[in-house]
Image: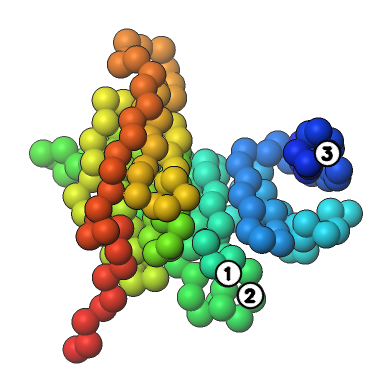
Amino acid sequence: KTMKVWDVRQGNKCVASAALPDKIFTMSTTSNRIVVGTSNRHVWVYDFRNLSEPEQKRESALKFQTRSLRCFPNGSGYAMSSIEGRVAMEYFDPAMAQTKKYAFKCHRAQDDKGVDTVYPVNALGFHPSYGTFATGGCDGKVIMWDGENKKRLQAPWAYPTSIAALDFNPTGAMLAVASSYTFEEGEKQAPPDQIFFRSVSDAEVRPRPKQPA
């Protein structure tokens, strides 16, 4: 329940800390903010310059436990995911939050009887230049999305087991994907833990604006 800020320039010295009322599940940063996702579906937004009090206290727009949270590259908001196969797009500015925020379903499969299987969305990662983003789920798939235009960009990329983590390199030309069973179905035989490095083309990550009617 404690968040700490470290300065590697000072030999990994802890320069600030903040106590939170809930267990910390995930966090992300922008140039001047730290966003923390905790248990009980809470989100705490801090200014780096003042950790004594959160700048904003929010409740997740998603109804189930938070799994991952990542800030937009432009610093205007954040995406967060849950165990119930959903992602929410949120904004720091209250005015923008009311008009632009939304949530969508993903990482789901339907059998031949029409029964849905819903997978946790464990990982989020934004392309550093375009602001499009990847999601990774317990279905072992990675999907690219254009959040601004509310579009899926390509067919899912499949991996041997659950996606535990993912992220782009600084240029956005490479995506690292950690494939590791996360015990969402309890103890069972699973493929070995592996890390994959995928080269991504511009066409796979570039936004696709809506065509005028």
The residue type indicated by label 1 comes to Ser
Total label count? 3
Q: Which residue is mark 1?
A: 76
Instruction: Write the residue at 33% across / 34% down.
Output: 197
Residue 150 percent across, percent down from the top left: 33, 68
Q: Which residue is mark 2?
A: 93
> Is the residue under label 2 in contact with that under label 1 (CB below 8 Å)?
yes
The residue type indicated by label 3 comes to Gln
Numbered label attached to residue 10: 3
Eye-nearest disc, 3 or 1: 3
Instruction: Write the residue at 54% across / 67% down.
Output: 74
- Number of residues whose C-alpha sits closer than 10 Å to that of mark 3, classed few (under 14), some (14–19) or many (20 or more): few
For numbered disc 3, what is the local secondary structure?
helix
Eye-nearest disc, 1 or 2: 1
Identify the mark nearer the N-term, 3 or 1. 3
Instruction: Write the residue at 86% across / 45% down.
Output: 16
Would residue 87 be seen by someone viewing this image from the given angle?
Answer: no
Name the side, left or right, on which 105 lies relative to 202: right
For numbered disc 2, what is the local secondary structure?
loop
